[in-house]
């Protein structure tokens, strides 16, 4: 009877661990025009600098044009590129080429797992996003 109790506890622990592991971010998509990294923490946590601007696809690289500056946003690998719709989607957020985006994070010079050859310039590590600009 003791073994049956242990087996139940072991099964419960395995179930909890399996559930916890399902939140692992996917690997980067090497065919995406979006620069990307594999996130190590939850979405919507991290630096809170704002990047608001127009999402553009320039020479095969997704960029944000903001106040006369072109910045390369580096998205978590959770974002999936849809080439037909020209959208990037994850976490309930859909970012469309030619439309305004409102991203949170911070400037980075750190490692990026995927950077399309045509991407150059300042990089912004994206750690959050929303459909409306931030107040202030």
Image: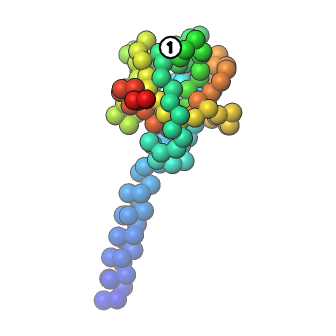
The spot of residue 111 in percent (x, y) is 67, 37
The spot of residue 38 in percent (x, y) is 55, 40
| Above or below 85: residue 38 | below
Identified at 67% across, 20% down, the residue is: 121
For the C terminus, the image quarter is top left
Is residue 77 in view?
Answer: no
The colour scheme used here is: rainbow
Number of numbered tags placed on the structure image: 1
Q: Quadrant of residue 129?
A: top left
Taking the image as shown, residue 111 lies to the left or right of residue 25, namely: right
Taking the image as shown, residue 112 lies to the left or right of residue 19, namely: right
Q: Quadrant of residue 87?
A: top left
Identified at 68% across, 37% down, the residue is: 110
The spot of residue 118 in percent (x, y) is 64, 16
On the image, numbered disc 1 is attached to which residue?
Answer: 56
Q: Quadrant of residue 115?
A: top right
| Above or below 116: residue 21 | below
Q: Closest to the observer: 80 or 63?
A: 63
For the N terminus, the image quarter is bottom left
In the current view of this chain or complex, which residue is farthest to the bottom? Answer: 1
Q: Closest to the observer: 112 or 107?
A: 107
Is residue 100 in view?
Answer: yes
Taking the image as shown, residue 12 lies to the left or right of residue 55, namely: left
Binning the other alpha carbons within 10 Å of mark 1 as few (below 14), some (14 to 19) or many (20 upward) gives some
The spot of residue 20 in percent (x, y) is 41, 57
| Above or below 81: residue 15 | below
SS of the residue at dot 1? strand
Q: Closest to the observer: 9 or 102?
A: 102
| Above or below 120: residue 48 | below
Identified at 47% across, 15% down, the residue is: 54
Identified at 36% across, 76% down, the residue is: 9
């Amino acid at each position: 009877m003791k073994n049956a109790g242990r087996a139940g506890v072991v099964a419960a622990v395995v179930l909890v661990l399996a559930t916890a592991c399902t939140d692992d971010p996917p690997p980067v998509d090497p065919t995406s025009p979006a620069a990307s990294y594999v996130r190590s923490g939850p979405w919507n946590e991290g630096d809170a600098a704002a990047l608001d601007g127009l999402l553009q696809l320039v020479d095969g690289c997704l960029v944000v044009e903001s106040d006369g500056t072109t910045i390369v946003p580096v998205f978590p690998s959770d974002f999936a590129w849809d080439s037909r719709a020209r959208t990037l989607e994850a976490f309930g957020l859909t970012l469309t080429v030619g439309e305004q985006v409102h991203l949170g994070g911070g400037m980075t010079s750190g490692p990026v797992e995927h950077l399309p050859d045509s991407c150059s310039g300042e990089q912004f590590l994206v750690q959050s996003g929303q459909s409306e600009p931030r107040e202030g």
